[in-house]
Amino acid sequence: MTNESFFYQALVYLATMVVFVPLAKKLNLGSVLGYLIGGIIIGPAILGLIGHGGEDLMHFAEFGVVMMLFLIGLELEPSLLWKLRAPILGLGGLQVTVTALVITGLAILFGLPWNQALVIGMILSLSSTAIVLQMLGEKGQMGSAAGQSAFSVLLFQDIAVIPMLAIFPLLAPQGAAVSEETTSLIAGQPAWARTLIVLGAVTGLVIGGRYVVKPILHIVARTRLRELFTASALLLVVAIAVLMTLVGLSPALGAFLGGVVLANSEYRHELESDIEPFKGLLLGLFFIGVGATIDFNLIVEHPMLITGLVAGIMTLKFAVLLGLGKIFRLSREQNLLFSFALPQVGEFAFVLFSFAGGAALLEKDIVSTMMAVVAITMALTPLLMLVFEKWIQPRLGSAADQADREPDQMDERNPVIIAGFDHFGTVVGRFLRASGVKTTVLDLDSDRVDLLRKMGLKVYYGDASRTDMLKSAGAEQARVIVIAMATPEKNREVVATVKKNYPHLQMLVRATDNNDAFDLMNDGVLRIYRETVDTSLRMASDVLEMLGRRAYQSQRAARMFRRFDERSLKGLSAYRDDKQYVNVMRERIEELQKLIQADAYTNMMIRDAGWDRENAEERN
Amino acid sequence: MKVLVLFAHPAFERSRVHAKLIRAVKQLPGVTLRDLYEIYPDFDVHPDTEQKVLKEHDVIIFQHPFYWYSGPALIKQWMDLVLEHGWAYGKDGNELKGKYMLQVISTGGNEGAYSPEGHHGHVVKQFMLPFEQSARLCHMHYLPPFVVHGTNQLSEQQLDQYAQGYTQLLQAIQAGQLDLQRAQQLQELNSLTGIPQITSASK
């Protein structure tokens, strides 16, 4: 590759990223779809800027997947991984097995020989780690039950690629030239030796990560050359990938293991922030490659075949996922999210198909058709997700989810009801419990309710904005309701219900910010608690203390600040929709600064005369 | 005369004596009650507010339990912050001039313990010297305390008598019927009310 063409290519790809991703983000489509669309547009089908280089690009950019798994490994401490063993083996294992078997069966029905059918079944059972994790991460869903399940399945699939690669040559027709990977050290070794080498490599990785990499990173870190650390981080990932390829393991899996080994190390965040941009770039390239490889000629030639295959594969995978999610007790909404996330075929399919083609396992026609199908399923995933979010999820929250799970029966008559029990409500509840106050807790997240119940907390599933729920929570007898739902909209719904049906209940309402507080004021709520004010002020007064101010004065100033801030908030609410708002706000801020200064320096010295003996004596 | 009761009790919920006394205060029209521990749980006494209230009253009563021969900490904090130089005392500090100040105190020990021969060696009023002199510095008249003695041994009936006596005292002050000159000579204001001597009875 000449320099010229290198710069030209870099120009095309980078420009594609910079143009299409912000555009997609702006349209709420997510970055993955942006890359894919960009790839389609610059690909041979439309602009033809990159010719047929898409596939080469993808092989190169697949390294982004390796980096991503390294980063995921870094986030996962071994103990957490151990906790996930059931979903990884159970959910992941079943997903791969069931999907592979069903597709194999269908392929045989369509007249393929059994060995080819099995190969296709196994390959199509995989999903795309790159697309799914990027997408779920962007939507903040990685921590949810669906996100965890999806992750478990993807991890199992990454592991499953290894035996697949091992089995393929055995499935090849007798006499066909079996092309082994020339890079693999262990080709031609007897089976027991292969196993030993693989085990040795993994053990070496774990031990090396702990006893070799850490000291090296320590030395590198002490040079205080940032780029050297970045180089070491990249070297680490590349070295793992090379080692894994040498012994015939999946580089992604190796990188993941390496990440887990280093998850407890003090360099975790450093490594994360160094690898992150490379991962992002490479994954972006990878998605562009996927978009560019979609062979539109093939689609035009066999529209029915391709459409049928895409629809069939995705529906089938979706159905299997939905069924497994049900078995593994995901709530309806989480199960749908999980199933909508994973029905595509993954990036490993490109590798495996070309491997199978090379091994004369599959005919060239089938390989190229399947490649197109795989790329289309990947490109469709973000669109499916969009459909799910826009049209399906909103209906679940209100009707379907409740229909799916009956609100819990409550027999409690407690003086306090807590509506909403995420990190905010939990603290309120814990404190009240510690103070011997009985509370009835309602929460909308069924998974959380189950979890808290397992932990021995009495939490009920139900929507506190519904009158009947409040009634069965004992709203008639209760005196106080703490409204701490996750979203301002939901909080206001609860406020409306309480005002209408239980006016005797005193409301304490969580607000996210000033605007939210204004809304609540308009609704006539008197006790409004902005989420972060108290914590921020505690932090700020600690800053003063660390700068050498006396603790008592710092905390007193913080309390005064809060009182003033709350008072001025009430005044500001009159101007909220006004153009004057900014001006009035500025005045208040200045006023407050003056007041604080007056208090901190003047007031504390002169006003608090009783604390300033010497001054007082003089003036006497 | 307008009466202000500044009440300070960090564990009011556990005090049967002050529960009765406060109920008596609340039943009297025209008496302003400020529950300091309820208003200032964070000890951030607002001097402006307190000074404004003080100016509107003629008689300032501190009602509190007897802790370490003095009042609870918030009373002291209140004094530190509110009785400012140049306002309550000092060259131009005349805002409290001519007002009356007195304390309503509950003690665990009985009257005998608070005597020169008793366990504590002094009468209650003697321990109140800092308050007395503070009042004087602020140009106020200091009246001797009204003391509920032996709180641990009091029967409900005796408590009711104290509450009644407190009510009488407040009414007399409001009506201007209390002989302030004479009162200033006493050790305790108890003898001005109808409270019988209960020291020996409770022993």
Image (spheres, grey):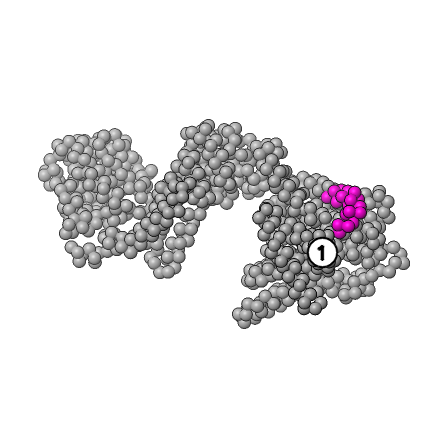
Q: Nearer the viewer, residue A394 or B109?
A: A394
Residue A78, relative to residue A518: is it above or below?
Answer: below
- Is residue B121 at least partly visible in the picture? no
Residue A279, relative to residue B68: is it above or below?
Answer: below
Residue type at the position of mark 1: Gly
Q: Nearer the viewer, residue A381 or A149?
A: A381
Q: Is residue A296 magenta?
A: yes
Give the left or right position of residue B117, taking residue A56 as reference: left
Residue at the front extreme of this rendering: A47
Residue A30, relative to residue A211: is it above or below?
Answer: above
- Which residues are drawn in magenta? A295-314
* Residue at the image point whose x is 34% and y is 51% from the top: A590
Write down the chain letter for disc 1.
A
Residue A351 in the image, given as x and y percentages of width and height: 75, 56
- Is residue B85 at least partly visible in the picture? yes
Which quadrant is home to the N terminus of chain B? top left
* Residue at the image point whose x is 27% and y is 36% from the top: B18
Q: Which residue is mark 1?
A: A48
Residue A471 in the image, given as x and y percentages of width and height: 50, 28
Residue at the left extreme of this rendering: B181
Dot 1: element: loop
Give the left or right position of residue A434, taking residue A218 as reference: left
Report which quarter residue A277 is drawn in: bottom right
Residue A118 in the image, given as x and y percentages of width and height: 81, 49
- Mark 1, Cα crowd under 10 Å, few <14 / some 14-19 / many 20+, is few
Q: Nearer the viewer, residue B76 or A464?
A: A464
Give the left or right position of residue A359, taking residue A70 as reference: right
Report which quarter residue B75 is drawn in: top left
Q: Main secondary structure of the magenta part?
A: helix
